[in-house]
Amino acid sequence: PPDGGVLLAEAAARDEAAARELLRGVAALVPGGRVRVVDRAGTVTAAAWQEFLEHEPREQAEQYYVRIPDVAALLDLLRPLLWQRLTAAGADPGGRDIVVSTFGAHYRIPVLPEGLGAVVTGGPMQGPRAVAGAGVAPDQLPALLFGPHGLKGLSRMRPDVYAARQELFHALFPPLTADVLSFYLPY
């Protein structure tokens, strides 16, 4: 910035020690100068930098517009993670497939004894509750998969995001905090 300070944003670190070292390194670039930090609540860097910041963390969760060109391919890539979440939570799929409908199409993920099977794409499904599935407006699918609210939070904010088996789908789609590299700084 023209005032001679440095803006540190979109920072990510493996752990709090690395985050503190990153902040020290950036501050060393401008001895006696000012480092302005833009942090996101819930991230490793925000937790590590709290003692150095002059403000309270923002309450508003950050969200980004994300496009998913091939939902089935993405869900297929996420199967190992979804299986890990499912088993870690001890959520019982009850011998039924996992069904996620974006209303214009639906995605069925078979639950097998050793993991999740390949994603099968189907046509429009307006009532996914009838098959114990979840309904997610297509523009909210990225927020469900990558956002800070998870299914539980999104379903409170959006009537077009819901699930029949809430315990199962809350385990599959928890709130996530992550740093997203973008050209839009969160301030």
Image (spheres, rainbow, N blue to C red):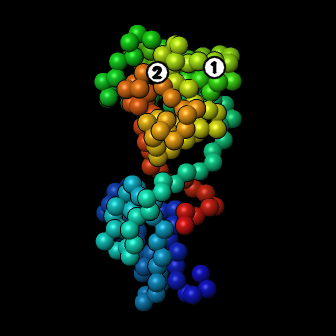
Whether residue 125 sits left or right of residue 99 in the image: it is: right
On residue 126, the disc is: 1
The front one of 169 and 51 is: 169
Can residue 45 be seen in the rendering of this structure? no
Give the image location of residue 75, x and y in percent: 56, 28
Residue drawn at (52%, 13%) of the image: 131
Cα–Cα gap, marks 1 and 2: 13 Å
| Residue at 66 percent of width and 31 percent of height | 70
Residue at disc 1, secondary structure: loop
Q: Where is residue 114 shown, x and y percent of the image?
A: 39, 15
Across and down, in percent, residue 147 comes to: 50, 44
Residue indicated by mark 2: 164
- Taking 123 as reference, is 29 above or below it? below
* Number of residues whose C-alpha sits closer than 10 Å to that of mark 2, classed few (under 14), some (14–19) or many (20 or more): some
Q: In this rendered view, identify the residue nearer to me: 25 or 62.
A: 62
Label 2 secondary element = loop
Q: Could one spot residue 97 in this view of the protein?
A: yes
Q: Residues within 10 Å of mark 1 (few under 14, many from 20)?
A: some
- Give, as a three-letter code, the residue at label 2: Ala
The amino acid on which the numbered mark 1 sits, given as a three-letter code, is Gln
> Residue at (42%, 89%) from the top-left corner?
32
100 or 121: nearer the eye?
100
Quadrant holding the N terminus: bottom right
